[in-house]
Image (tube, rainbow, N blue to C red):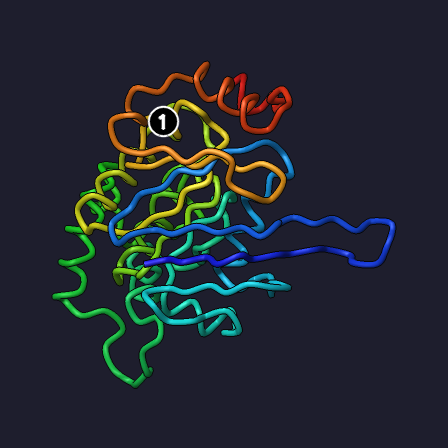
Amino acid sequence: MLRIEEIWKTFNAGTVNEKTALCGLSLDLKEGDFVTVIGGNGAGKSTMLNAVAGVWPIDEGRIFIDQVDVTRLAEHKRAAYLGRVFQDPMTGTAANMQIQENLALALRRGKPRFLGAGITKSEREMYQEKLKVLELGLEDRMTSKVGLLSGGQRQALTLLMATLKKPKLLLLDEHTAALDPKTAAKVLEATDRIVGRDGLTTLMITHNMKDAIAHGNRLIMMHEGRVIYDVSGEEKKKLKVSDLLAKFEQASGSEFANDRMMLT
C-alpha cells in the first residue's frame, strides 16, 4: 500500500544551514499494516511523513501509494489517497462549525458540490453511529460548535474525519503528543478501534516508546534519515523500552538522547 524507494531530502542545500533529513530512506507497508515510528530529534520522522503527504518535494527517489507513483503529485491531489491527523488538536477541524457540519465536509471531500440539503437525515444517523465509536458522548452533541470541545475531543473528531472515507493510507503525526496522558490514552484506544475495524494501512509517529510497542503490528526506529530497526509480530509484542534503547545503541553506535521519549 506504501512503497518508499531510496528517497533523499536536503534542506537549505548549499548554505551553512544545510541539513540532510532523509538519506536514501526505503520502506514498504503492506495493506493493513499499522506501523509505529520512533526516533530521536532530527531522525527524519516528520520529514518522511511530509514527503509521503507531498508537503515537501523530495530530491531523489520515488513514492508509491497503492501502486500509483505519486512522487511528483501535488499535495492537494495526493490528499485523495490519504487521511491525516496532525499534532495540534486545533488543526483539522473548523472551530466555528458544528460537529455534524465538520463530518459533512469530510464526507464530501473530493466530490462535486451541488445545491441541496446540507445534511440529510440518513447522514445524520450515520454520523451518530460513527461518533459512538469514539466513546466520548459526541453523538449527543452533533449541533455543538467544534470550538467548544476539549483538545482531546477535537483530536478524536479529526481522527474520525480523516477516516470517514476510508483512505489508502492514514498518517498520524504524533497525534496524541499535545494531550494529557488520560486523554491521549482514549484517543489511542479510538485509533485502535477505527484502524482495526476498517483494516486501515497506518503510519503513526509517536514520541512515546511504550505506545510504539503497545500499538500496531510493526515498529520501526529511525536515525539520521534512515531506518535502523524494523520489528513486527511476536518479537514486537515482547519488546520493552530497555530493549529499544539497547537496539538504538547497537544500530546507531551512540546513546539514545531524547528526554521527551525516555521520560514519557
Q: Residue at x 78, y 58 (%)?
A: 13
Q: Residue 238 or 136: which is nearer the viewer? A: 238
**Image position of 256 with respect to 113: above or below:** above
**Image position of 243 with respect to 65: above or below:** above
Q: Amino acid at mark 1?
A: Ile
The residue that mark 1 highlights is 213
Q: Residues within 10 Å of mark 1 (few under 14, many from 20)?
A: many
Image spot of residue 174 (x, y percent): 48, 39
Tell which residue pokes out farthest to the bottom in this image: 114
**Number of callouts in the render?**
1
Q: Residue at x 50, y 17 (%)?
A: 246
Q: Quadrant of the N terminus?
A: bottom left
Q: Residue 61 or 178: which is nearer the viewer? A: 61
Name the element at disc 1: helix
Left or right side of 70 for 47: right
Tell which residue pokes out farthest to the top in this image: 242
Residue 138 falls in image quadrant: top left
